[in-house]
Image (cartoon, helix red, strand yellow):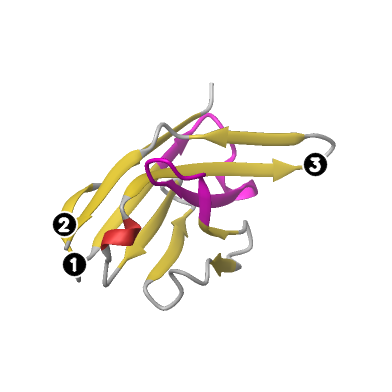
Amino acid sequence: QVRLVESGGGLVQAGDSLRLSCAASGLIFSQYTMGWFRQAPGKERESVGSISKNGTINVADSVKGRFTISRDNAKDTVYLQMNSLKPGDSGVYYCRAERTTWRSFDYWGQGTQVTVSA
């Protein structure tokens, strides 16, 4: 059974930093592209960024220069380091594991709340 468990969310002030973690189990973590998404109330879920199994990182333009993604394959964990947080960064942050071979494998975590006060 695949599980993705996010942690590290909370209430912070604008300008603060947070580091989210997503611990994976039940899959061969090193073979998956790991992504972070977020969803604010009343808005669609949007991609924050991803890190491939080879370590290639992509981040959304809206967070470029402030957020970075890393992974530790020895710990089956992916991280989202968020700096210079803004109120617009508030939302539920989700972790995703994705792999496409002869079929697609796509798993999501339950999310962690991030609230940035002005």
- The reply to whether the C-beta atoms of the residues labelled 1 and 2 are less than 8 Å apart is yes
Q: Quadrant of the N terminus?
A: top right
Q: Secondary structure at mark 1?
A: loop
* Residue 49 at least partly seen: yes
Name the residue at 29% across, 42% down: 113
Depicted 6 relative to depicted 1: above or below: below
Q: Is residue 70 above or below residue 73?
A: below
Residue underneath mark 2: 12
Residue bearing the label numbered 3? 101
Q: Nearer the viewer, residue 81 or 39?
A: 39
Relative placement, left or right, of 58 versus 93 is right
Of marks 2 and 3, which one's residue comes earlier in the chain?
2
Residue identifier under label 1:
16
Q: How many marks?
A: 3
Q: Nearer the viewer, mark 2 or mark 3?
A: 2
Q: Nearer the viewer, residue 15 or 76?
A: 15
